[in-house]
Amino acid sequence: MPTTSLTLISSMATKALLADLVAAYSAQHPEVAVAVTSVGGVDAAKRVVAGEAFDIVALASDAIEKLAASGHVAGDSRVDMVHSAVAVAVPAGAPRPDIATEDALKAAVLAAPTLGYSTGPSGVQLARLFERWGIAEQIAPRIVTPPPGTSVGSLVAKGEVALGFQQLSEMTGVAGIDVIGGLPEAVQIVTTFSAARATVSAQPDAVQKFLSFLSSPQTADLKRRHGMKAV
C-alpha cells in the first residue's frame, strides 16, 4: 500500500505520457502514489498561481520559468522531460495535402476550409508563423479554437476542422484522424516540457526522486512511443 501521496498538475500535451510514466514509477516504488490532474496549460498555470496545492507542476518550459520567477515552483528542482514537435492531421480518409515544404504547407493552409490549432505554446508559435507568411487576417475566419482541455484531434475527428495542428503526442492514437506528418523542418515547432516542485509542497525529497525519474534515461523509450524525444 502507498505510504506517500504526491499530486501533479500538467497540461494536456503530456497527459498520456505522464499516465504511463506514473505507472512505471509506481511499479518500481509501490510505496508512492502519484495523482495527475491534466488540464489546459493556461488553466494549469492559473491554478498554481492561485495557490492550489500541488507537489509537482509539469508544463511547457517557458511556463515553468515564469512560475519559478514568481516563486510558485522551485527553479532549482526543474527537470526537462521531453521535446515535442507539432504534427498535422486531417479527418480519416480525407485527401492528404502536401506539407513537405514550407511553400507546400502554406498552400495547404490557404486551401483548407477550416483550421485548428491549440491555445498552448505551439499554437502561439503557429500563429506567429501565419503572421510572418502574411496570411493571418485571411485565414482568421476559418480558424476553429478548441475549448480548454479539448484536443484539436477530436475536432478533426468530428469534421469540425479540416486541417489540424497539435503536438504529435496529442494526435497519436486519436480515432477518426489521419496524421499526415510533422511540419517541414524549416518551420517545425518544438516545445520542451519540464517539471518542477511546487513551492507549497511539503514533500521535497519524494518529489525530487520522482522528478529524477522523469528525466532518467530509462524513460526514453516510453517517451518515443508517445511521439516525443527525451531531452
Image (cartoon, helix red, strand yellow):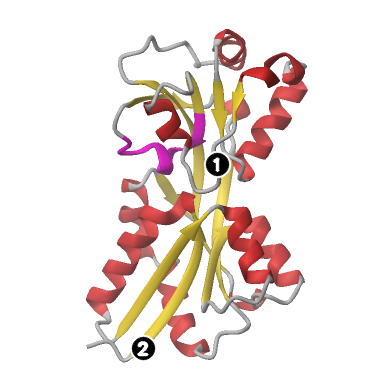
Q: Residue at x 46, y 11 (%)?
A: 97
Examine the rendering and report whether any part of residue 81 can be seen. Answer: no
Q: In the drawing, what numbered circle is on residue 124?
A: none
In the image, is residue 57 above or below residue 144? Answer: below
> Which residue is the site of mark 1?
147
Sooner in the amino-acid sequence: mark 2 or mark 1: 2
Q: Secondary structure at mark 2?
A: strand
Which x, y percent locates residue 94? Answer: 36, 12
- In the image, taking residue 40 as reference, residue 90 lies left or right, namely left
Under mark 1, the amino acid is Pro
Which x, y percent locates residue 219? Answer: 35, 61
- The one nearer the camera, 58 or 212, is 58
Q: Secondary structure at mark 1?
A: loop
Q: In the drawing, what numbered circle is on residue 4?
A: 2
Q: Based on the picture, tell me whether residue 172 belongs to the magenta stretch.
A: yes
Q: Residue at x 32, y 83 (%)?
A: 32
For the residue carrying disc 2, how many other residues have a C-alpha within 10 Å: few (<14), some (14-19), or many (20+)? few
For the residue carrying disc 1, how many other residues have a C-alpha within 10 Å: few (<14), some (14-19), or many (20+)? few
In three-dimensional space, the C-alpha distance between marks 2 and 1, rounded to whole angstroms, equals 34 Å
Quadrant into which the N terminus falls:
bottom left
Under mark 2, the amino acid is Thr
Q: Which residues are magenta?
A: 165-174
Examine the rendering and report whether any part of residue 44 can be seen. Answer: yes
- In the image, taking residue 52 as reference, residue 84 lies left or right, namely left
